[in-house]
Image (cartoon, grey):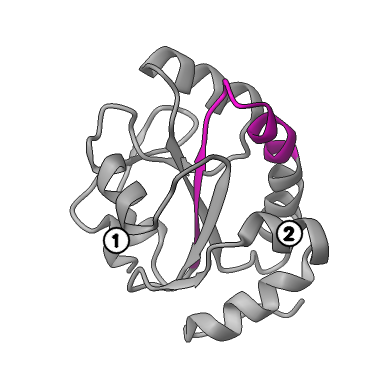
């Protein structure tokens, strides 16, 4: 389980609460720091959607990958609108959860967008997920998976 979200509640796109212990177990996790008011975020989010769709929704078995969106939007309504309009079918930390500030500090987030790829224990695999996806596409997932030290069922 990704210890970084232990004891927290995440949301899915339907607005349902999700237990991170179940949803993130044995997966590489991308923590996506982003905001709807940010043009580079709005530029990268569709690229991330395609990456996620190919890895998770179109692979059989689905890749061991999950994204958790951590919003830098100005309020809950802005976050929900951006999440529903542009994001993939991944998870989000509720906007009202103050833990987002701790995450930004822990992962040294000074600007958005930022995609930090972490192991189950929260250790960083790379803080350059956005650049790696742009430069290498799906190929970067294999190196993340190898670095994550989890049981693998990924064939790609």
Is residue 42 within the magenta segment? Answer: yes
Task: Find residue 133 and name its label.
Answer: 2
Task: Find residue 4 and name its label.
Answer: 1
Residue at x 27%, y 66% (from the top left corner)? 3
Label 2 Cα neighbours within 10 Å, binned few <14 / some 14-19 / many ≥20: some
Note whether 11 is above or below 56 in the view shown: above
Residue 98's spot in the image, x, y percent? 22, 36
Q: What's drawn in magenta, residue-wise?
A: 28-46
Note whether 102 is above or below 116 in the view shown: above
Note whether 3 is above or below 7 in the view shown: below
- Give the image quarter of residue 58: bottom right
Residue at x 50%, y 80% (from the top left corner)? 148
- Give the image quarter of residue 84: top right
Residue at x 48%, y 69% (from the top left corner)? 27
Q: For this view, does 62 lie left or right of residue 114?
A: right
User: Disc 2 and disc 1: Cα gap in Å?
Assistant: 23 Å
């Amino acid at each position: 389980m990704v210890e970084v979200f232990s004891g927290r509640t995440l949301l899915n796109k339907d607005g349902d609460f999700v237990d991170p212990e179940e949803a993130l177990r044995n997966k590489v996790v991308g923590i996506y720091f982003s905001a709807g008011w940010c043009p580079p975020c709005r530029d990268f989010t569709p690229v991330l959607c395609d990456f996620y769709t190919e890895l998770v929704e179109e692979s059989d078995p689905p890749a061991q990958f999950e994204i958790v969106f951590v919003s830098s939007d100005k309020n809950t309504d802005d976050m929900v609108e951006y999440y529903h309009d542009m994001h993939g079918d991944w998870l989000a930390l509720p906007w009202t959860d103050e833990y987002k500030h701790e995450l930004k500090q822990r992962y040294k987030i000074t600007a958005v967008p930022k995609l930090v790829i972490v192991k189950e224990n929260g250790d960083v695999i790379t803080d350059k997920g956005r650049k790696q996806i742009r430069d290498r596409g799906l190929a970067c997932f294999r190196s993340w998976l190898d670095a994550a030290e989890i049981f693998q069922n990924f064939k790609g």
